Amino acid sequence: MIKKWLIWLRYAMVPRGQTKKAFIHDMGITATLMGAAALFCVFLNIAGDSDSAVPMVFVLAVLLTARFTDGYFYGLFATIISVFGVNYAFTYPYFEFNFTITGYPLTFLTMFAVSLVVGMLTEQVKRQGRIEAEVEREKMKANLLRSVSHDLRTPLTGIIGSSNVVLEQYDMLSDEEKKEMVEHVREDAQWLVRLVENILSITRINDGA
């Protein structure tokens, strides 16, 4: 059981394969949303009594964090920051921790549940998007192969046909007709060369992308 939880935490904290740049980007989103929520709550405090509004502001910030970041870590991290931040800076007695306030455990559980649910839904949407993109790529690849096969078949059929005529009716053909058959073979061969070069160019472009 412990091993399963450790495996879950490994993939929940930071998505597998996430780059350092993506990690910094998601942390930036988290910090920005938490900072914006804190600043807005400061303005609410200046304007008047905001004890009931502050938790909702941070719940919204947690929800947005879970939605616009990758994985569960950032939503959970925002939840922890929100719970301790609201308790310390926006709840009486101010700038002191007091977890005996009525209803505070419910606020914590609400934020925690929001971050988990939104994180899971976001991951499912992204996973579905990746699957659809992969299906589309495979479909495009199949269409390309069919198109290439058709384009290859046409000049190859011409080369085989002209070659068979020359080989089977060599003595019956005039020099001019033989020259014409060989010219057809050369044109079809040049067509094949251009087609292969185009395919290689597309492959190099895709590799670069």
Image (spheres, rainbow, N blue to C red):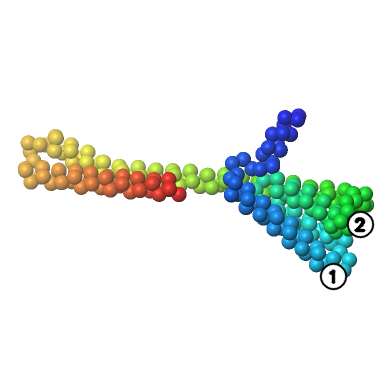
Q: Quadrant of residue 58?
A: bottom right
Residue at the disc numbered 1: 47
Residue at the disc numbered 2: 93
Q: Residue at the location (88% across, 61% down)?
A: 51
Residue at the bottom extreme?
47
- Relative placement, left or right, of 119 versus 93 is left
Q: What's the mark number on residue 66? A: none
Q: Residue at the location (11% across, 45% down)?
A: 179
Please tell me whether mark 2 sits on a helix, a strand or a loop. loop
Indicate the position of residue 158 as horizontal and vertical percent values.
23, 43
Q: Amino acid at mark 1?
A: Ala
Label 2: how many residues lie within 10 Å, few (<14), some (14-19) or many (20+)? few
Q: CA distance from mark 2 to mark 1?
A: 19 Å
Position of residue 168 relative to residue 129, above or below, is above
Indicate the position of residue 13 as horizontal and vertical percent values.
69, 42
Q: Quadrant of residue 175?
A: top left
Q: Quadrant of residue 178?
A: top left
Work out which quarter of the rendered image holds the N terminus and state it.
Answer: top right
Please tell me whether mark 1 sits on a helix, a strand or a loop. helix
Label 1: how many residues lie within 10 Å, few (<14), some (14-19) or many (20+)? few
Q: Residue at the location (23% across, 46% down)?
A: 190
Q: Report whether residue 147 is seen.
A: no
Indicate the position of residue 78 as horizontal and vertical percent values.
75, 51
- Relative placement, left or right, of 107 versus 32 is right
Q: Report whether residue 15 is seen.
A: yes
Q: Residue at the location (83% across, 49% down)?
A: 108
Position of residue 193 relative to residue 93, above or below, is above
Q: Amino acid at mark 2?
A: Pro
